[in-house]
Image (cartoon, rainbow, N blue to C red):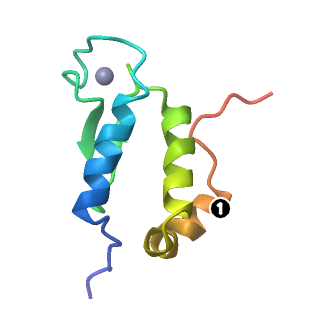
């Protein structure tokens, strides 16, 4: 049996792409070719570029974006609750 994947609807993917662009720290980047993301996961989420994007900032805004939309909250709400931004400085 195939595992069911929660796929992000395409129009939200388009919004996510615009969102990362607002968190760019550099003008030109040869890791993502200025797209702001390096790939798309199998559940249709973008992978923000670690080189030129403020990942923490974009994650925070994405969380708010999801929380503001009932359909997305149903899909991702649970995973966002306990998940912390990856590789947060430990101290
Ligand atoms: Zn980049």
Residue under the image location 26 percent in, 11 percent down: 28
> In the image shown, does 12 or 5 lie closer to the viewer?
12
Residue under the image location 48 percent in, 26 percent down: 54
Question: Which corner quadrant of the image does residue 50 belong to?
Answer: top left
Left or right, 43 with reference to 72: left
Give percent across and percent down for residue 9.
27, 66
Count of numbered circles on the image: 1
* Residue position marked by numbered label 1 in the rendering: 81
Residue furthest to the left: 33
Residue under the image location 22 percent in, 15 percent down: 30
Regarding mark 1 in the picture, which secondary structure is present there?
A: helix
Residue furthest to the top: 27
Residue 18 vertical position relative to residue 31 in the rendered view, above or below? below
Residue under the image location 34 percent in, 46 percent down: 16
Give percent across and percent down for residue 83.
62, 54
| Ligand 1 shown in quarter | top left
Quadrant where the N terminus sits is bottom left
Give percent across and percent down for residue 15.
32, 49
Q: Residues within 10 Å of mark 1 (few under 14, many from 20)?
A: few
Left or right, 22 with reference to 62: left
Residue furthest to the right: 91
Left or right, 80 with reference to 74: right
Question: Which corner quadrant of the image does residue 24 belong to?
Answer: top left
Give percent across and percent down for residue 59.
52, 43
The yes-or-no answer for disc 1 within 8 Å of ligand 1 is: no
Question: Which corner quadrant of the image does residue 10 belong to?
Answer: bottom left
Residue furthest to the bottom: 1
> In the image shown, does 2 or 72 lie closer to the viewer?
72
Quadrant where the C terminus sits is top right
Residue 29 vertical position relative to residue 57 in the rendered view, above or below? above
Residue 11 vertical position relative to residue 4 in the rendered view, above or below? above
């Amino acid at each position: 049996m195939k595992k069911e994947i929660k796929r992000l609807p395409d129009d939200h993917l388009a919004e996510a792409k615009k969102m990362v662009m607002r968190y760019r720290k550099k003008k030109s980047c040869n890791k993502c070719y200025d797209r702001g993301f390096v790939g798309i996961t199998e559940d249709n989420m973008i992978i923000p570029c670690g080189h030129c994007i403020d990942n923490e900032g974009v994650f925070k805004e994405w969380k708010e974006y999801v929380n503001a939309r009932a359909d997305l909250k149903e899909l991702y709400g649970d995973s966002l609750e306990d998940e912390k931004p990856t590789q947060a400085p430990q101290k």
